[in-house]
Image (cartoon, rainbow, N blue to C red):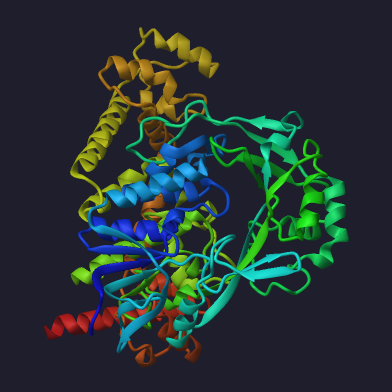
């Protein structure tokens, strides 16, 4: 079969999933190509120009430990950094950063162009070339045939995308860019069942026409928490955001025009994200609420364009403008871009393995919104895993998996391939069974060795990580062994802090376990004893000591769970021969093909009793094979 060009891995789509997939496979030695409709839109932030948030920030930290680009790119282009949930426990704290939209896109493209094994291509992929049940290449709109040993499909909202603004609708992948229609038809011809989802975006406004004195100013953190362990400081000037509220008048405008909303007229068929509803949905479903919070967030340093976070809408343009002008401080606002809703095709992720390879077509991987997810971070995490596994497949090596107990990325993957989606999927810390083990501060301890072994992290970075935890362990051991002497000058000082006598003979570790003490009280002692730690390293020690009992308990639970749930199920396992399984359970397990007992246990309708039967049967089979050999 003749091909104009041949690559080890071809990635379709230049969004956040596609960028990470292409980089990962190229870094692993693959000759990789990234095909996109518009090279100038690589890394485009179609919705809010921001990265991170609760659970999402955790994924970005995990990406950094696996060699991903997003963490360093946002650190270099961020214009406001904030740690969310700072007043709550360490398990639910997460960083978020506002980005300069244009700088982010430019920096991401620079990262891709620096990778010698990666080739950027502009063109529309319109069809798959399949030999038997394997994808072997792709067809480009201009007639070229591209050979590929593995393909990663990361098309975002472009598959059969349809934009809605009031009564008007038109095909597009996002505003101003064409949808991918031919690829959708090719996908359906291969027999993949498609679903329909919907997402949306708010209007953008001209900041020169806003009276910001009517809004509450919101600055970022004076000491930003960055996403990459390799970053040392922010690069861009830091800007303020502004907080405001909707008004009863705005709610009245929506109610009077709700019949013109494509969400309520029946024009939109796709299911939207429950956790990020449009302002129409908020007003209708929370009718007793008098106001809703909105945030005015700058799009970048070189523009006056403002993103109105919290006001996602697909109402007609005239209604959107009336809504905006009902908000105090925005009476004379000029709308630059209207908000809109977009429907797009997706495939149920239960048709994927945990490596993100389709079960129907070998060597074809999916990542991002085609899997039913929403959010840049979720897409980037999937892209990284798909790119890694595409490279491993080409090498003929075993796939790479992340467990639920070791990464939020692992939780997302397991949720998607085990349960599927009935609405756009979004990560939350509440999805984690062991979230105290999955903090943002220990992502490097959890994952950087894996990144190094895959060839995605340099030896220097891995050695720096090891040195960091040697310092932390040594300082923690010092606090454990050092007891407070009778004559210590710290006794009176700390007794005042504790509002009671601090007895001699107590260890510094025991003191730090007390709620009134923080690691700051021990900074001077640690410093004078030769333990020179960064602020982040001291915080890790405080968390480890204060939550030691809870951490130990969760680790024991993980060990118990893994003993059973990590047992792998052969991909060709015949469930019909397992006595005691109901017909419904056999049908679901045979169709979804879970890779492990843990994944099987999370499939709807698969009972604990069925998992127990399967566990016993797999163990008997293992013993039978061992005896035969």
Give the left or right position of residue 78, taking residue 304 as reference: left
Give the left or right position of residue 273, taking residue 92 as reference: right
- State the image coordinates of residue 164 (x, y, percent, origin top left): 68, 66
Residue 11 placement: quadrant: bottom left
Q: Quadrant of the N terminus?
A: bottom left
- State the image coordinates of residue 612 (x, y, percent, origin top left): 40, 77
The residue drawn where x is 51% and y is 52% is 45
Given residues 353 and 389, the one toward you in this image is: 389
The residue drawn where x is 38% and y is 83% is 360
The residue drawn where x is 43% and y is 19% is 521
- State the image coordinates of residue 80 (x, y, percent, origin top left): 53, 35
Residue 361 placement: quadrant: bottom left
Given residues 284 and 23, the one toward you in this image is: 23
- State the image coordinates of residue 297 (x, y, percent, origin top left): 62, 40
Q: Residue furthest left?
A: 629
Q: Residue furthest front?
A: 142
Residue 404 visible at all: no
Given residues 461 and 561, the one toward you in this image is: 461
Q: Quadrant of the C terminus?
A: bottom left
Number of numbered labels in the structure image = 0
Given residues 226 and 37, the one toward you in this image is: 37
Please say if 541 is above or below 248: above
Give the left or right position of residue 12, taking residue 398 as reference: right
Please say if 244 is above or below 608: above
Please say if 281 is above or below 469: below
Residue 483 visible at all: yes
């Amino acid at each position: 079969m003749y091909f104009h060009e041949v690559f080890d891995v071809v990635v379709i789509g230049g969004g956040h999933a596609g960028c990470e997939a292409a980089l990962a496979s190229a870094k692993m030695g693959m000759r990789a190509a990234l095909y996109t409709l518009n090279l100038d839109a690589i890394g485009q932030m179609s919705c809010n120009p921001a990265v991170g948030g609760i659970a999402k920030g955790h994924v970005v930290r995990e990406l950094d430990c696996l060699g991903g680009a997003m963490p360093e790119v946002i650190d270099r282009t961020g214009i406001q950094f904030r740690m969310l949930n700072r007043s709550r426990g360490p398990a639910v704290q997460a960083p978020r950063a506002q980005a300069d939209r244009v700088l982010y896109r430019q920096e991401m493209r620079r990262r891709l162009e620096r990778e010698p094994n990666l080739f950027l291509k502009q063109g529309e992929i319109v069809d798959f070339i399949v030999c038997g049940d394997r994808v072997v290449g792709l067809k480009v709109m201009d007639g070229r045939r591209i050979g590929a040993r593995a393909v990663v499909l990361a098309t975002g909202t472009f598959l059969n995308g349809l934009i809605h603004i009031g009564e008007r609708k038109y095909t597009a992948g996002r505003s101003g860019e064409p949808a991918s229609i031919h690829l959708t038809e090719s996908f359906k011809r291969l027999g993949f069942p498609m679903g329909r989802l919907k997402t949306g975006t708010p209007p953008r406004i001209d900041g020169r026409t806003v009276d910001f004195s009517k809004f509450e100013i919101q600055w970022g953190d004076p000491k930003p928490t960055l996403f990459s362990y390799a970053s040392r400081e922010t690069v861009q000037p830091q800007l303020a955001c502004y907080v405001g509220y909707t008004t009863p008048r705005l709610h009245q405008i929506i109610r009077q025009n709700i019949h013109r909303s494509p969400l309520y007229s029946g024009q939109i068929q796709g299911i939207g994200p429950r956790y990020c509803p449009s302002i129409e949905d908020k007003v209708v479903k929370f009718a007793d609420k008098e106001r809703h919070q909105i945030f005015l967030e700058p799009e970048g340093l070189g523009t006056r364009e403002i993103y109105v976070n919290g006001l996602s809408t697909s109402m007609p343009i005239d209604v959107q403008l009336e809504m905006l002008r009902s908000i105090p401080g925005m009476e004379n606002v000029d709308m630059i871009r209207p908000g809109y809703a977009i429907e797009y095709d997706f495939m149920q992720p239960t048709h994927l393995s945990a490596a993100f390879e389709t079960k129907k077509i070998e060597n074809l991987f999916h990542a991002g919104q085609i899997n039913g997810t929403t959010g840049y971070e979720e897409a980037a995490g999937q892209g990284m895993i798909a790119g890694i596994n595409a490279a491993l497949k080409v090498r003929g090596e075993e796939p790479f998996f992340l467990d639920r107990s070791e990464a939020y990325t692992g939780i997302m993957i397991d949720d998607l391939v085990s349960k599927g989606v009935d609405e756009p999927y979004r990560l939350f810390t509440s999805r984690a069974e062991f979230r105290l083990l999955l903090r943002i501060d220990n992502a490097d301890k959890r994952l950087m060795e894996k990144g190094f072994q895959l060839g995605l992290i340099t030896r220097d970075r891995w050695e720096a990580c090891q040195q960091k935890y040697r310092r932390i362990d040594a300082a923690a051991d010092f606090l454990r062994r050092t007891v407070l002497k009778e004559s210590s000058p710290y006794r009176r000082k700390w007794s005042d802090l504790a509002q009671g006598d601090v007895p001699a003979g107590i260890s510094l570790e025991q003191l730090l376990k007390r709620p009134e003490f923080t690691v700051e009280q021990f900074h001077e002692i640690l410093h004078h004893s030769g333990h020179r730690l960064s602020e982040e390293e001291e915080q890790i020690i405080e968390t480890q000591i204060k939550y030691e009992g809870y951490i130990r308990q969760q680790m024991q639970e993980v060990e118990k769970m893994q003993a059973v749930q990590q047992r792998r199920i052969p991909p060709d396992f015949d469930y019909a021969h397992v006595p005691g399984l109901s017909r419904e359970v056999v049908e679901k397990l045979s169709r979804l093909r879970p890779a492990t007992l843990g994944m099987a246990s999370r499939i709807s309708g698969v009972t604990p009793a069925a998992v127990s039967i399967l566990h016993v049967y797999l163990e008997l089979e293992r013993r039978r094979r061992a005896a035969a050999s």
